[in-house]
Structure formats: C-alpha cells, structure tokens
C-alpha cells in the first residue's frame, strides 16, 4: 500500500520505479491525498522508488530508494517544494 499526501498545489502523476522501469499508479490532485496498491512481487529482493510528476509543471518529487517488506505501507508526502518530499515505511 502507498499513501500519497500531496501538499503541492499541482496535480501529480504517481509512479513506482522498479529496476529502472516506471509503472504509473495513478493521480493525486493538488492539496489532497490518495492510496495505491503495489504488487508485492514487484518489490521482492530489490529497492523501489516512488515518484510524483506535476501535471502542467516541471520537476519531480522522489522518495529515494526504498526496501519494502510484505505488508508494510509507504507514506509519501509531496512537499509544496518538490525537493522537500519525504517517504516513510510503516509496519502494520
């Protein structure tokens, strides 16, 4: 599970990057939140990166590499300034 909190005023396309391949998860409107699911089989034995790309803007918000275990949840907060975005892994 990925919970995205978008503190930016722009709408964001959310994606997961695994082994250099980007897979779109969906969209989160500006100043709102959304939840997405990632198939656990994509994350086994490798790190993933969550990205947020602004629609109609420039730049990218990135989580940095994450190592996620089965059942864990990623909280990705997109900052008002994209480079201030953070990610946290939470256990159930």
Image (cartoon, grey):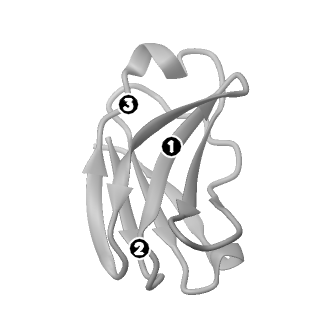
Q: Which residue is mark 2?
A: 6
Left or right of 56? Residue 75 is left
Q: Which residue is mark 3?
A: 38
Q: Secondary structure at mark 2?
A: strand
Residue found 54% across the figure and 16% down from its top: 44
Residue that lies at the very extreme toward the front in this rendered image: 56
CB atoms of marks 1 and 2 within 8 Å: no
- Number of the label disc, if any, that sits on residue 36: none
State the quadrant of the N terminus. top left
Residue found 50% across the figure and 18% down from its top: 42
Residue found 46% across the figure and 55% down from its top: 13
Label 3 neighbourhood size at 10 Å, few (<14), some (14-19), many (20+)? few
Res. 75 image quadrant: bottom left
Instruction: Say which of 29 and 57 sits in front.
Output: 57
Between circles 3 and 1, the one closer to the viewer is 1
- Number of the label disc, if any, that sits on residue 15: 1
Q: Secondary structure at mark 1?
A: strand
Mark earlier in primary sequence (3, 1): 1
Left or right of 58? Residue 32 is left
Label 1 neighbourhood size at 10 Å, few (<14), some (14-19), many (20+)? many
Q: Secondary structure at mark 3?
A: loop
Label 2 neighbourhood size at 10 Å, few (<14), some (14-19), many (20+)? many
């Amino acid at each position: 599970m990925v919970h995205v909190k978008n503190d930016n005023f722009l709408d964001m396309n959310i994606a997961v990057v695994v082994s250099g391949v980007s897979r779109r998860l969906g969209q989160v409107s500006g100043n709102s939140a959304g939840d997405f699911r990632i198939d656990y089989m994509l994350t086994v034995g490798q790190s993933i990166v969550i990205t947020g790309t602004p629609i109609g803007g420039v730049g990218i918000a990135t989580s940095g590499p994450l190592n996620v275990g089965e059942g864990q949840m990623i909280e990705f907060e997109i900052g008002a300034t994209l480079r201030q975005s953070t990610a946290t892994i939470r256990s159930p």
